[in-house]
Amino acid sequence: MKLAALLAAGALALAVGGPGTARVTEDPCLETGETPVQLTASDGASVYGVESGTGTTGVVLGHMYLSDHCEWTDFTHRLVAAGFRVLAIDFRGYGDSRGGAASRLDRDIAAAVARLRKDGATRVELVGASMGGAAVLVAASWIRQAVDGVVSLSGPAAYRGLDALRAVRRSHVPVRFVVGTLDPPFAADAVRLMKAAAARDKAILRLLVGSHGSSLLRQPRASAFVLRFLGR
């Protein structure tokens, strides 16, 4: 681990000051200029995240199964360089997030949206990978004030109590789906979700690859598709 990352993460058990910030003992992904935050979801779950950038358009990033916020490091750099404010979170039960109903990952997304709005974001977009894709689709269907857009990267139609198919049928939030056609059953789920979505502004990008979730963003067409949507 690099010394700069250790110091930034507070590996010497230093507290990071300010309301809503997190006391972090070690975060190997935290970089200079980023802010660790501790959020509280509506059901009491404690949600850890890292906020980066200063733009007025905020982007919440939700990770894949058996992962955490570190999954988004490279994409966060791209977003910040493009002028976005970014908050990548650990879902409850992963990384440094704990408590709450295990299936309600959408509440963690909502807590992150509230944080970005408090910190100055006038627009908020959601991006989720795999299980995180289901979480952002569900969250987008009920968060009020409504978010401005949602992106699902290989998100399933349903995941452990999160019914993304039902959510897109009642959500009018602009939505984009990205999936590898060689990634069953997620490839079929993306098509089902796209067809079912009630949003007038919707589109799907299907790539002839087996890549899954956030790894799709290594494909130039996929990253360009997502960045163009977020920056519209």
Image (cartoon, rainbow, N blue to C red):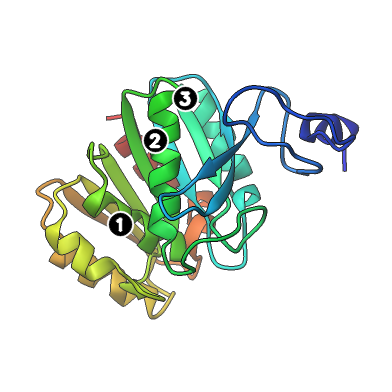
Q: Of the residues tagged 1 and 3, which is closer to the observer?
A: 1
Query: In terms of secondary structure, where does tag 3 sit?
Result: loop
- Does label 1 or label 2 sit earlier along the sequence? 2
Give me the residue at 27% from left, 41% from top: 149
Q: CA distance from mark 1 to mark 2?
A: 17 Å
Residue 21 vs residue 64: left or right?
right
**Label 2 near label 1: C-beta < 8 Å?**
no
Q: CA distance from mark 2 to mark 3?
A: 22 Å
Query: In terms of secondary structure, where does tag 1 sit?
Result: helix
Give me the residue at 51% from left, 65% from top: 211
Question: In which quarter of the view is residue 228 placed?
Answer: top left
The kind of residue on which mark 1 rests is: Leu
Q: Callout 3: few (<14), some (14-19), or many (20+) C-alpha neighbours within 10 Å? A: few
Question: Disc 2 designates what residue?
Answer: 114
- Residue 96: percent from left, percent from top: 67, 53
Q: Of the residues tagged 1 and 2, which is closer to the observer?
A: 2
Instruction: Please give the count of numbered marks on the rendered protein.
Output: 3
The kind of residue on which mark 2 rests is: Ala
- Does label 2 or label 3 sit earlier along the sequence? 3
Query: In terms of secondary structure, where does tag 2 sit?
Result: helix
Residue 229 vs residue 120: left or right?
left
- Residue 21: percent from left, percent from top: 62, 31
Find residue 82 and name its label. 3
Question: Disc 1 designates what residue?
Answer: 137
229 or 31, which lies in front?
31
